[in-house]
Image (spheres, rainbow, N blue to C red):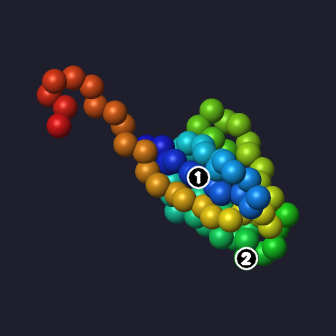
């Protein structure tokens, strides 16, 4: 299952949105550790393997949720 991550960045009108194969707890720990340690950047990897670096000091908020797989067809409920 993939996880949807939305990151709000200070003084930026749009949020950064990505889908990751990592589980929600691992992403939460990565972000929390970077913010607590004063690390320069938070590094995340999306489901296509792209590495995303976000300056930790500029993070306004982080939303971590699960992505539901879409059901297709008449029997989907």
Secondary structure beneath dot 2 equals helix
Which residue corresponds to mark 1?
6
Against 24, is 38 above or below? below
Crowd class of label 2 (few under 14; some 14 to 19; many from 20; radius 10 Å)? few
| The furthest residue to the top | 73
Where's the C terminus, which quadrant?
A: top left
Where's the N terminus, which quadrant?
A: top left
List x then y, in percent, for residue 16.
Answer: 66, 47
Secondary structure beneath dot 1 equals strand
| Left or right for 11, reference 21 | right
| Left or right for 63, reference 61 | left
User: Closer to the observer: label 2 or label 1?
Assistant: 1
| The furthest residue to the right | 40
Mark 2 to mark 1 CA distance (whole Å): 19 Å
Task: Determine whether label 2 and label 1 are within 8 Å by CB.
Answer: no
For the point 43% across and 51% down, the residue is 66
The total of numbered circles placed on residues is: 2
Label drawn at residue 36: 2
Label drawn at residue 31: none
Whichever of callouts 2 and 1 sits on the residue coming sooner in the sequence is: 1
| The furthest residue to the left | 75
In this rendered view, identify the residue nearer to me: 11 or 36. Answer: 11
List x then y, in percent, for residue 8.
Answer: 65, 57
Would you say residue 43 is visible in this rendering?
no
Against 10, is 37 above or below? below
List x then y, in percent, for residue 13.
Answer: 69, 51
List x then y, in percent, for residue 14.
Answer: 66, 48
Crowd class of label 1 (few under 14; some 14 to 19; many from 20; radius 10 Å)? some
């Amino acid at each position: 299952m993939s996880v949807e991550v939305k990151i709000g960045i200070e003084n930026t009108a749009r949020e950064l949105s990505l889908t990751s194969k990592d589980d929600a707890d691992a992403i939460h720990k990565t972000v929390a550790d970077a913010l607590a340690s004063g690390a320069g950047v938070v590094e995340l990897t999306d489901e296509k393997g792209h590495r995303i670096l976000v300056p930790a000091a500029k993070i306004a908020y982080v939303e971590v949720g699960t992505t539901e797989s879409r059901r297709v067809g008449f029997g989907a409920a």
